[in-house]
Amino acid sequence: MPSAKINIGNVEITSLSDGALEFDLCNFFPEIPSESWSGYEQYLTPEHHVRFNLACFLVRSEGRTILVDTGLGAKPADAPETPWGELLNSFRDNGVRPDEIDMVVMTHLHRDHVGWNLQSQDGKYTPTFPRARYYFSAKDWEASHDPQFQAERFTNAPECVWPLEELGLMELMDGEYTLTSELTTLPTPGHTPGHMSIMISSQGQRGLILGDVLHNVVQVHEIDWVSRADMDPEQTRATRRSLVERLEREGTTVAAIHLPAPGFGKILISEGRRYWQAL
Ligand SMILES: [Zn+2]
C-alpha cells in the first residue's frame, strides 16, 4: 500500500517505514514512575509498552531525492516479534528504487537510524543506495568513535557507518548545513551530541523533520521526561523545550520519526496546554 505523503510548498515528503520497536516503560523511561503515566494511557500499547514507528522520510526537493534516516536494517534471527527490516518493502510499495536516492541524510547515528546504509558480503561493504552520498553530523561521527560511548550508544556504527569513510561516500555536517535551497539542518543536540533536525522552507510554508527530539506524544505535555536513549538529559530537555515552543508558535508542519505512523502533525495549543495534532 502506498504511504502517506504531504507537501510543504514544492517539497514532497513520503513517510516510509522500517517497522516498529517496542519497550517496557521501566526499560525505556526508567526514571518516570509508572503512576505518572496515569491519564496518558492512550499513548501506550494495550500492554503498557511504548511503541515507536521507524519512519524513514523520502523527500523530493529541487530534483533531488533524499532519504532521511535508514531504520534498523535487516532483521536478525533473534529480533523481537515487532515488524522490523521493512524499508526496502516500503520502497517497493511506493514505486521507489534504491538507486533513485541522491542523498541519505541521518538525523543522528543511533542504530535505528542507520541500519540500511550498507550491505555486506564476504567482508566487503557496498552502499544500499548506490548513487547516494551519505550526510551526517561530524559531532556524532566523533562520538561514535569514543570508547566511552561506542559499544552502548552507537552499537552498529562499525558496520553501518564507519565503512562509509573508506568507500568515499561520507559528507560530514556541522551547524546549519544547506542540503538544498529548501532544506537546512538545525542542530538539536541532547539525544546525541550532533543530533540534527531538518528545516524545510518552500513557497512561504515551513516544515521540520524532527528526528528524536520526541519519542512519544506524552513528551509534548511532559517536556522534561527523558528516556534512557537521551545521552545528555539536561541538553535534551532544553532543546525540546525551545523547539516545541517554536514549532507551536510558527505553526510548522512536523514529520516525526518515532511518533505513530505516518508521523505528520502539528503542535497546537488550547487553553494554555500544548498537544500533538496528527494530520
Ligand atoms: Zn531513534
Image (cartoon, rainbow, N blue to C red):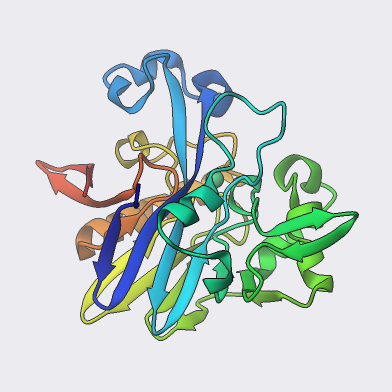
In the picture shown, does residue 73 fall above or below 99? above
**Count of numbered badges drawn on the protein:** 0
Q: Which residue is pictured at 71% across the width and 44% down the height?
A: 153
Q: Is residue 210 left or right of residue 189?
A: left
Quarter of the rendering containing residue 140: bottom right
Q: Which residue is pictured at 75% across the width and 47% down the height?
A: 156
- Measuring from the top left, give residue 200's x and y in whole percent: 35, 72
Q: Is residue 79 left or right of residue 95?
A: right
- Measuring from the top left, give residue 215's x and y in whole percent: 45, 40
Quarter of the rendering containing residue 50: top left
Q: Is residue 116 left or right of residue 26?
A: right
In the picture shown, does residue 109 fall above or below 141? above
- Measuring from the top left, give residue 113's x and y in whole percent: 59, 52
Residue lying furthest left in this view? Answer: 271
Q: Nearer the viewer, residue 179 or 92?
A: 92
- Measuring from the top left, give residue 44's x and y in whole percent: 37, 24
In the picture shown, does residue 178 fall above or below 261? below
* Ligand 1 - quadrant of the structure image: top right
Quarter of the rendering containing residue 95: bottom left
Residue lying furthest right in this view? Answer: 122
Residue 29 in sight in this render: no
Residue 91 in sight in this render: yes
Q: Which residue is pictured at 47% across the width and 74% down the height?
A: 65
Q: Nearer the viewer, residue 150 or 182?
A: 182
Q: Which of 76 and 157 is in front in this view?
A: 76
Q: Which residue is pictured at 59% across the width and 39% down the height?
A: 229
